[in-house]
Image (spheres, coloured by chain):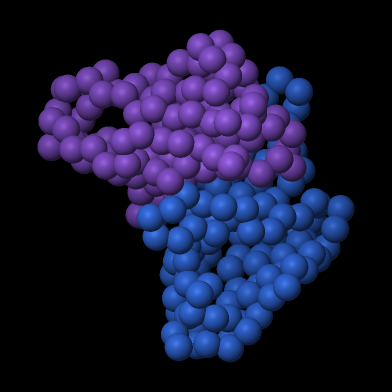
Amino acid sequence: EAQVTQNPRYLITVTGKKLTVTCSQNMNHEYMSWYRQDPGLGLRQIYYSMNVEVTDKGDVPEGYKVSRKEKRNFPLILESPSPNQTSLYFCASSWLQSNSPLHFGNGTRLTVT
Amino acid sequence: QQQVKQSPQSLIVQKGGISIINCAYENTAFDYFPWYQQFPGKGPALLIAIRPDVSEKKEGRFTISFNKSAKQFSLHIMDSQPGDSATYFCAATSFSGSARQLTFGSGTQLTVLP
């Protein structure tokens, strides 16, 4: 089954404690992206990757890091989480073309206290 | 800088009614306009999409109307059902060969009353 898998689904942590949210896709997609969803703000892009070892900033990259060492994996790293990073996070993948639909994971709800 | 503006933020419709969600974009380089539907606890999923050389696309009860000159597009849900209750996002996307740009609207929470 074609899917994007994120882990964990829920995460509660404290300010400053490094964490990683994993994302894996089994469709051999070149394009992968991370979004955060906040009420009234919609889906805002954090980082995206066009292919292995090619990553770039989205609209809200501050406080986040990513890596793309393998085509299927695109982890999101918060080196020193802060309460304003409490949010619902989604990973997505697709082919590069404009008309290729994004396939989303089921989300990771992160709470930073 | 919000490149895709979506309205309304929330919408309540009676069963059988028509739901209309509007979006406007600024960047004329966008060349594909999808709508995504999101149910609670799930990631968004593609619902319907349109190219800018087409003025209307219909799939079942869902229709996109596109006005290229006004840089506006809208989603119409005919005969709305309680199962349509979800959050809807419009989006605009382009691919230049070296970069793919995809921008979402702020979302509309639709509630269809039984």
Q: Residue furthest right?
A: B53
Percent coordinates x, y for residue B25 in the rendering:
65, 50
Q: Nearer the viewer, residue B32 or B73?
A: B32
In the rendered image, the quadrant that contains the C terminus of chain A is top left
Percent coordinates x, y for residue B77 in the rendering:
63, 75
- Where B65 falls versus A69 (above or below)? below
Q: Nearer the viewer, residue B72 or B88?
A: B88
- Where A11 falls versus B10 (above or below)? above
Is residue A49 in view? yes
Q: Is residue A26 left or right of residue A10?
A: right
Percent coordinates x, y for residue B42 in the rendering:
44, 53
- Where A38 falls versus A34 (above or below)? below
Q: Quadrant of residue A2?
A: top right
Give the residue drawn at x 45%, y 61%.
B39
Is residue B25 in view? no
Q: Which colour denotes chain A?
A: purple
Give the residue drawn at x 18%, y 38%.
A12
Percent coordinates x, y for residue A84 in the rendering:
24, 37
Q: Residue furthest front?
A: A1
In the rendered image, the quadrant that contains the N terminus of chain A is top right
Q: Quadrant of residue B114?
A: bottom left
Give the residue drawn at x 66%, y 44%.
A101
Give the residue drawn at x 77%, y 61%.
B67
Among the chains pictured, the one given blue colouring is B
Q: Nearer the viewer, residue B6 or B102?
A: B102
